[in-house]
Image: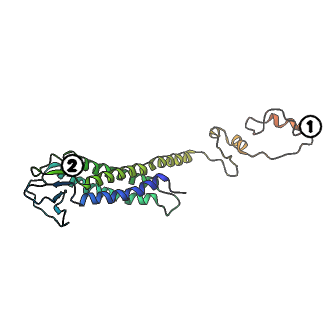
Amino acid sequence: MRTPAAMVVGIVLAPCGLILNLTSTLAPNWRDLSRIPDKAFDIIQHQGIWDICEESVSTHDTSCNIQDSLDYYSQLPVQVSKGLMPSSLAVLVLGLVVASLGVRCWTETPHFLLAGLGGLSLFISGVLSLIAVSWYNYELYNLPAVAGSTLQVGYCLVLGYLGSCLEIIGGVSLAVSFAQCCKECKLKKDAKNYNYPPAGVQAPATFPTVASSVDHKDFEMYYRTPTPRSYTNSLDVLEDERASKYSYRSRLPCDSDL
């Protein structure tokens, strides 16, 4: 059995979302401050959720662990992002492990239930990171900053949006496996409740619903494959026309046996 296309999409997009969200979480570029008063004109301050760095555009020198003099880290959007982004990464890694066991490209048949659970985890991870990035972006200009400086969106927010969208799309693609899982469960339930014919009785390709309501004798007559026979008496031609109601032969007159 080939791996379904939805599984392939999910298992490919999820690692891409992991890389983007991991970079967004660790890099200190959620917000950039430029043209800061009392500092060199080419100094840009990068503010993240874990660290604050200053970079000189002309020399490309970067210094981190800048002291937070504006009480930036205590703001609610920053605190929420500190909690949601690592949680999103943890749920994402767990979802990737479960989804990998469910897809099982090295075996003949995927495990649809595990693939669906992995997709659900990926979807939750994408929602968590999307909440953190969206909230920070909404409060970007309300967070404390040096008076007179210019505020710009950092590339971490862009990576966070992309990573969250990839995780959500990948999670939905894998969660489609729940439908196939339900279908398999229904087939197993139908097979368990089906009354199979006795040993030695040949059943047709499609099983009629009337089979469970007939007795053993009629059941055997119903499933028995008719065998060709030769006629020695002209009266025997009409014998099959008077057969029981379970016969496979046509009830219409037919002169092919004459």
Q: Nearest the camera: 256 or 26?
A: 26
Residue at x 53%, y 60% (from the top left corner) = 108
- Find disc 1 in the rendering and name its residue: 234
What is the x, y in percent for residue 111? 47, 56
- Quadrant housing the C terminus: top right
> In the rendered image of this protein, does residue 225 appear above or below residue 67?
above
Q: Nearest the camera: 183 or 62?
A: 62
Is 225 on the left or on the right of 142, as rendered?
Answer: right
CA gap between label 2 and label 1 equals: 94 Å
**The quarter of the displayed image where residue 208 is located:** top right
Residue at x 45%, y 54% (from the top left corner) = 7
Is 107 on the left or on the right of 54, as rendered?
Answer: right
Q: What color scheme is it?
A: rainbow
What is the x, y in percent for residue 151? 17, 50
Is 247 on the left or on the right of 209, as rendered?
Answer: right
* In this view, the mark in front (2 or 1): 2
> In the rendered image of this protein, does residue 22 appear above or below residue 209?
below
Q: What amino acid does circle 1 point to?
A: Ser
What is the x, y in percent for residue 34? 16, 55
Q: What amino acid does circle 2 point to?
A: Tyr
- Name, please, the residue furthest toward the top: 252
Q: Nearest the camera: 135 or 177?
A: 135
- Quadrant housing the N terminus: bottom right
Residue at x 65%, y 47% (from the top left corner) = 197
- Name, please, the residue furthest toward the right: 233
Disc 1 crowd rating (10 Å Cα; few below 14, some 14-19, many 20+) is few
Mark before the other along the chain sequence, 2 or 1: 2
Disc 1 secondary structure class: helix
Disc 2 crowd rating (10 Å Cα; few below 14, some 14-19, many 20+) is many
Q: Which mark is residue 136?
A: 2
Disc 2 secondary structure class: helix
Q: Which mark is residue 123?
A: none
